[in-house]
Amino acid sequence: MTDLLDAVLAACDRHGSAAAVTRGLRSARLRRTRLETHTYAELGAAIRSTAAGLRAEGMQRGDRVLFSVRPGPDAVILALAIVLAGGTVVFADPGAGEALFRARTALAAPKWVAAESLLYFGSSGPLRPLARRRGLDLAPYARLVPDARHLYVGPWLPGVPRGALPVRGLRSAARRATRLETPPVGYPGDGFETRPAAPGAPQPTGGRESDEALIVFTSGTTDAPRAVVHTRGSLGAGLADVAASSMRAGQRVVTDQLMVGIPALIAGAHWIMPTPGLDPGASPKRYLGLLPDAEVLFTPPAALDAILRLLDDAPHLAPLRLETLILGGAPVLRPLLERAFARFPGVTIRAVYGMTEILPVAIADGAEKLARRDAEGDYAGRLVPSVRARLDTGELVLSGPGLAAGYLGEPPLAEVRTGDLARLDGDQLVLLGRKKDMFIRGTQNVYPGLYEPVIAGLPGVREAVMTGVPDAIGDDRIVVLVVPDDPPAHPDSSHPVARAVARALPGLIDAGALPDLVVAVPELPRAGRSRKLDRAAVAGIARSLS
């Protein structure tokens, strides 16, 4: 098994002066972008000294840190330093809504909170109503966790709690604790210490592969949030598989995803991070400014669709050095592959199949995927080395070193049932369909059974059902059908109850499961003697309304 921190820090020591992480920073005043680049030596020193600072400030093995910092060098350094110091990163999406955010926080029981100063500022008393008017129901970060220690990234702003520690100041705390009197040596202006810690310095815990490292909330409601718990070993095994299959030292890898960027670091590649908020699906034209020198690009299928549409009209913007295109987060279907190969001839395409509990599971070569015209299913590729697979009455069941430790507050996992029907040809995996009542929206698996009871419990709603309508690139548009206490004669999206449901759901269910359309209907279709809900007919109604 590969330990996550061992793998990253070994790469930092091995690649020294090579560029590790670059992020573009917008300057509104100068109306231009400047680059922030850190070498592997600087990155390794920053991780180690930040971890030492956390330990000097009292972080103990097993402490959980509620983490709301957007992707960037500071976020990467802090997340890895927390794990190196023996803590656990609890990814927290502030856009989930206050009620759900509070429920998740209560389940995780963190002792620390790490957030951007802007988030503390925006969730403070005077500004919360303004944030709500703009669609952000932010929890009050400064008061959310009683007696928590607070860390902040960025400049101090009003709303940052008294006594909160600036993340870059943690390295100073480590120096004070070791009585290191000489000034740090580092990259000009970055504040990163590159001088080795003094002899006798308090060291972060060595840790074990079985130590809890990351908690990711995947689904659930305010009454029953659910999260996956990964260890240093399970993360190291899976991410090392991605690194070995798709990247090499020195390659320029463009992504804002930690689960792709960390493998880039393990491989010794150069991780290019977009400016926070620069999304390839929402703003593909601006995103293409990052790509002229990109050699590896990760994107979800929906974002690649947006990029390809733009390049159809502006082919001169196409990346010139692209070698590998990595697709993940949703099914990769034949039409999108054909368009990608037509636009990027000679590029290697890797389609990653995985799940939050075990990522990746299998990786398919795009050309091989196109060549296999398997009428029975979708070729998902070869199982990665850290995964073991078996079939139980046709359902794919997974285990191995890359499997998460379990779900937060539940017994440990020995294996995970995927809900996918499959066929195994040696180490090659073919997906045959879904056994579970589940569909995919963006990068999130959506389980209707988790959300329908919540929707049905809203005022004026007698019954509710959620379904997905697939589009041409394998994504799902979410449609919710509700039967009001006073049902309409015909389907009606403007019905007062339908509109009230659409307004009420943010903050009650996952942001990734919010419906694209809510429609009031006279009744839900049922079949058989038991009058069981006919989900196939529900999907047909949703398709006719979309």
Image (cartoon, rainbow, N blue to C red):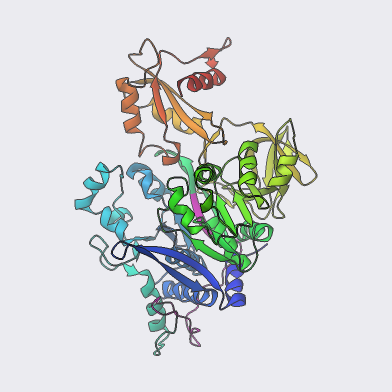
**Closest to the observer, 396 or 369:** 369
Percent across and percent down for residue 358 are 61, 49
> In the figure, 504 relative to 390: above or below?
above
**Closest to the observer, 39 or 207:** 39
**Closest to the observer, 291 or 216:** 291
> In the figure, 41 relative to 344: above or below?
below
Q: Is residue 196 magenta?
A: yes
Is residue 302 at least partly visible in the picture? yes
How many discs mark residues in the rendered view? 0
> In the figure, 91 relative to 353: above or below?
below
Percent across and percent down for residue 7 are 61, 68
The single residue placed furthest to the left in the displayed view is 126
- Kindly identify the residue that appears in the image at 41 percent across and 47 percent down: 104
Q: Quadrant of residue 379?
A: top right
Quadrant position of the N terminus in the picture: bottom right
For the stretch drawn in magenta, what is the main secondary structure?
Answer: loop
Q: Which residues are magenta?
A: 187-216
- Kindly identify the residue that appears in the image at 57 percent across and 36 percent down: 473
Q: Is residue 505 left or right of residue 331?
A: left
Percent across and percent down for residue 42 are 49, 76
Percent across and percent down for residue 279 are 44, 50
Q: Quadrant of residue 503?
A: top left
- Kindly identify the residue that appears in the image at 35 percent across and 13 percent down: 488
The single residue placed furthest to the bottom in the displayed view is 182
